[in-house]
Image (cartoon, rainbow, N blue to C red):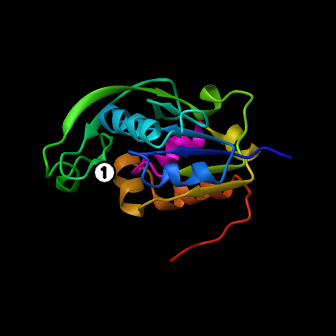
Amino acid sequence: QQSSTALVIGSHIGALALQFAARVDKLTCVEANPWNYDLLKLNVAMQNLSNKVSCLNVAVAEQAGSVEFLCSKDNTGGSKIKPEHFDVDFRYDQPESIEVATIPLDTLFIGKSFDFILMDIEGSEFAAIRGGRDLLLRCRVFVVEFVPRHVERVAGVSINDFSATLLSLDFDYVEFP
């Protein structure tokens, strides 16, 4: 029997991520917000999933280092790397700013592969994909949720550049409305 593995990047507190635990042998969750990470670990423990779910508290990016990270007070799922264009949409709730470590996916998971990768990281997908190209090319299924405005304002890149980066992975793709 072949084992199955999944990686959820932007796991939040696990509401969606932990649903995969019943369908895979091993699940890895990555969450940059330290408060969400603590709740994610608590959810893993409360659901007795510690034997099949591992959690990492780090932000994925194109390069290793650190970034200013905004912890949203009104929408914990909206926490994100500080946008290149810090307009009112990203500061309306006066988010707390902290520094978080970053690491490229290709460094974090060197030599590893996953059957399924889900990424939802509030506009930081462009840098994460660029820092995780080798890992992404080794997976069978890659799902990325993105908001064009977040890609443009948070990452500071056009949606055309983002699309070109995705298409360079040469996956068969399906668009959802």
Question: Toward the viewer: 168 or 117?
Answer: 117
Residue that extends furthest to the bottom in the rendered view of this protein:
177
Q: For the residue marked with disc 1, what is the amino acid? A: Gly
Residue 128 inside the magenta-drawn segment: yes
**Is 49 placed left or right of 132 in the picture?**
left
Above or below: residue 121 compared with residue 64? below
**Is 53 placed left or right of 13 in the picture?**
right
| Residue 126 drawn at (x, y percent) | 51, 47
Question: Toward the viewer: 16 or 83?
Answer: 16
Q: Who's the residue at 44% across and 51% down the image?
A: 157
Above or below: residue 106 compared with residue 152? above
Q: Who's the residue at 45% across and 57% down the image?
A: 158
Question: Toward the viewer: 83 or 120?
Answer: 120
Residue 45, by quadrant, is top left
| Residue 172 drawn at (x, y percent) | 74, 64
Above or below: residue 166 compared with residue 8? below
Q: Which residues are magenta?
A: 120-131
| Residue 122 drawn at (x, y percent) | 39, 51
**Is 70 placed left or right of 37 in the picture?**
left
Residue 129 inside the magenta-drawn segment: yes
Residue that extends furthest to the top in the rendered view of this protein:
65
Q: Who's the residue at 69% across and 43% down the image?
A: 25
| Residue 136 drawn at (x, y percent) | 68, 45
Element type at mark 1: helix
Mark 1 residue crowding within 10 angstroms, few (<14) / some (14–19) / many (20+) = some
* Residue named by callout 1: 78
Give the tally of numbered discs: 1
